[in-house]
C-alpha cells in the first residue's frame, strides 16, 4: 500500500426548521405558504448551514394534538394543506439554487400507529403528501416516527407495523425515498406510565422492524435518523450502539443524524430513576386524567424530571458524565460514526435540532447568534473528528504507524 494522503471527509451541517416556528408570520405564510420555506432557506444561509431539514406537520387548524400538550411544538414550515405540485417545487428549488442551501429531507414527526383508525388514516394521508413533496424537491428521504398503538404491547405493535406501516413504505419505495426513523421513545405522548410510545426506539427494535420490512420487499426504505439525546435518555452510549449494530450486521441502518444532546440530572435520577416521574405530575386532577391540554403536557415530566435537552455547544460537561452516559461525547460520537457505521460522510447530514428550552427563543434576531454558534460548534467538532479519523485510519495506517492510546471503548464497564 502506498502512502495515503490526508483527505478528511466532512459531513454537511443542517438545521431543523422547527427551531424557529414562526420565522414567517402566520398571517403571511397562510396566504403564501411557500414563502415560509424561502425565508427559512435564506435564514439558514445567514446561519452558515449547508442544508435544512424541512419541518412539516398538520396545520394548527387540523392537528389533533394541541400545542399546549406538546413539550416541543412542531412546525409546519412546509404547508401541505394544498398538495405540493411542480409549480410550488420549482419556486422552492429556485430559492435552493439562489441560497446554496440544500434540503436534506422533509421531517413529519407524528404517531403513525395511532389507536383511532380515523386519525391514523388522516396522518397516513398527510404522510403521502409529505412523500410527494419530498420527491418533487429531489430529497432522498423523509424523517419521522413509527409510533405505537398505546392500547397494545410493543410485541403486538409489531403486527400493527406490519399491517399499517408497510403500505407506507411501499409508497415511499414507489417514489424512490427512504423513511428514516427517529428513535425518541416519546414518553409524554400518553398520560399513563408508559415510557416507550414509539416502538422504533432502540437498536433491538430497529432490527426487528427491518426484518419485517425485508420480508415485504421494502428493507431498503427503512433507515434510522439517529439522535444521541434519546440514547442518553435510556442510559445508552453512542459507541456501544454503533458497535452493536456493526456486530449484528446492521451498520448500514443509520443514514442521518439529529445533533441534539441530553444532560442528565443526577438529582432527578436519584428521585425517579430512568423512566422518570410516574406520580404527581399534574396531568391528573382528582385522580383522573385532566381534559386540559396544558395539564396533559405535564406527562412529559416522565422525561423532564431526569434530564434536559442540550443544544450542541451550550453546555459545560464534567468529563465523568461522558463515561456515565449522562451526556453526549460529541467528538467520540463523530469518530464512532466513521469507524463503525456504513456511511459516506459527504452524504450523511448532521441536523442541529434545537430543543434547549431556555435558549429556544422565538425571535429571529435573538435566536440567530445562538443557532450560528451551535452550527459552528457542530461543524468544528465534525471537522476535528474527520481529521482524526483520516490521520489515524488512513494516513498512519498506510505507513504502518500505530495509533496512540486506547480511546473510548464500546460496552466498557
Image (spheres, rainbow, N blue to C red):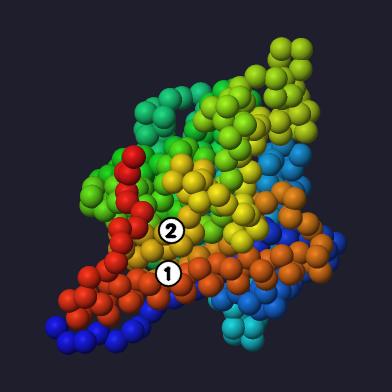
Instruction: Decide: few, some or many residues near mark 1? Use Cα within 10 Å; few <14, some 14-19, many ≥20.
Output: many
Secondary structure at numbered mark 2: helix
Instruction: Say if 174 sits above or below 157 in the image.
Output: below
Residue visible at 62% across and 54% down in the picture: 316
Q: Quadrant of the N terminus?
A: bottom left
Pick out the residue farthest to the front: 405
Image point (56%, 55%), residue name? 260
Q: Quadrant of residue 107?
A: bottom right
Looking at this view, name the residue that lies furthest to the left. Answer: 1
Q: Which residue is mark 1?
A: 385
Tags 1 and 2 touching, CB below 8 Å? yes
Residue 193: x %, y % from top left: 57, 23
Q: Is residue 286 left or right of residue 11?
A: right
Q: Residue at x 46, y 24 (%)?
A: 152
**In-image side of 255 versus 58 (left or right):** left
* Residue 338 in the image, given as x and y percentages of width and height: 35, 65
- In the image: residue 263, left or right of residue 216: right
Mark carried by residue 237: none
State the separation of the CA atoms marked 1 and 2. 9 Å
Image position, residue 217 (x, y; %): 28, 52
Question: What label does residue 333 carry, if any?
Answer: 2
The residue under the point 25% across, 85% down is 4
99 vs 186: above or below? below
* Residue found at the very far top of the displayed protein: 287
Work out whether 300 lies above or below 367. Answer: above
Graded by Cα atoms within 10 Å as few (under 14), some (14 to 19) or many (20 or more), the crowding at tag 2 reads some
| Residue 198 visible here | no
Depth check, front residue: 33 or 72 = 72
| Residue 49 image point, x, y percent | 60, 74
Q: Nearer the viewer, residue 216 or 256?
A: 256
Is residue 388 visible in the rendered structure shown here?
yes
Compare marks 1 and 2 and give the one earlier in the sequence. Answer: 2
Amino acid at each position: 500500500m502506498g502512502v495515503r494522503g490526508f483527505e478528511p471527509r466532512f459531513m454537511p451541517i443542517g438545521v431543523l426548521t422547527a427551531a424557529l416556528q414562526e420565522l414567517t408570520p402566520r398571517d403571511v405564510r397562510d396566504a403564501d405558504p411557500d414563502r415560509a420555506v424561502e425565508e427559512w432557506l435564506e435564514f439558514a444561509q445567514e446561519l452558515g448551514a449547508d442544508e435544512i431539514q424541512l419541518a412539516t406537520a398538520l396545520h394548527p387548524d387540523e392537528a389533533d394534538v394541541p400545542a399546549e400538550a406538546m413539550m416541543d411544538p412542531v412546525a409546519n414550515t412546509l404547508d401541505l394543506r394544498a398538495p405540493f405540485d411542480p409549480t410550488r417545487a420549482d419556486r422552492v428549488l429556485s430559492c435552493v439554487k439562489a441560497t446554496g442551501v440544500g434540503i436534506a429531507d422533509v421531517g413529519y414527526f407524528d404517531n403513525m400507529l395511532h389507536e383511532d383508525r380515523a386519525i391514523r388514516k388522516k396522518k397516513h394521508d398527510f404522510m403521502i403528501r409529505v412523500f410527494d413533496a419530498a420527491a418533487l424537491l429531489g430529497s432522498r428521504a423523509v424523517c419521522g416516527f413509527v409510533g405505537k398503538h398505546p392500547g397494545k404491547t410493543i410485541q403486538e405493535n409489531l403486527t400493527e407495523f406490519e399491517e399499517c406501516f408497510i403500505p407506507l413504505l411501499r409508497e415511499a419505495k414507489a417514489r424512490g425515498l427512504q423513511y428514516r426513523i427517529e428513535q425518541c421513545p416519546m414518553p409524554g405522548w400518553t398520560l399513563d406510565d408508559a415510557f416507550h410510545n414509539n416502538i422504533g426506539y432502540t437498536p433491538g427494535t430497529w432490527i426487528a422492524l427491518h426484518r419485517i420490512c425485508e420480508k415485504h420487499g421494502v428493507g431498503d426504505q427503512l433507515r434510522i435518523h439517529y439522535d444521541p439525546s434519546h440514547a442518553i435518555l435510556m442510559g445508552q452510549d453512542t459507541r456501544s450502539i454503533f458497535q452493536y449494530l456493526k456486530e449484528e450486521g446492521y451498520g448500514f441502518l443509520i443514514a442521518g443524524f439529529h445533533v441534539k444532546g441530553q444532560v442528565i440530572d443526577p438529582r432527578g435520577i436519584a428521585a425517579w430513576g430512568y423512566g422518570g416521574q410516574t406520580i404527581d405530575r399534574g396531568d391528573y386532577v382528582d385522580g383522573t386524567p385532566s381534559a386540559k391540554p396544558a395539564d396533559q403536557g405535564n406527562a412529559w415530566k416522565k422525561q423532564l424530571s431526569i434530564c434536559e435537552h442540550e443544544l450542541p455547544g451550550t453546555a459545560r460537561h464534567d468529563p465523568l458524565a461522558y463515561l456515565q452516559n449522562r451526556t453526549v461525547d460529541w467528538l467520540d460520537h463523530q469518530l464512532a460514526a466513521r469507524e463503525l457505521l456504513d456511511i459516506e460522510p459527504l452524504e450523511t447530514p448532521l441536523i442541529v435540532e434545537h430543543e434547549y428550552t431556555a435558549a429556544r427563543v422565538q425571535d429571529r434576531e435573538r435566536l440567530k447568534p445562538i443557532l450560528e454558534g451551535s452550527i459552528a460548534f457542530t461543524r468544528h467538532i465534525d471537522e476535528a473528528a474527520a481529521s482524526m479519523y483520516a490521520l489515524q485510519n488512513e494516513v498512519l495506517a498506510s505507513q504502518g504507524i500505530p495509533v496512540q492510546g486506547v480511546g473510548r471503548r464500546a460496552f466498557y464497564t
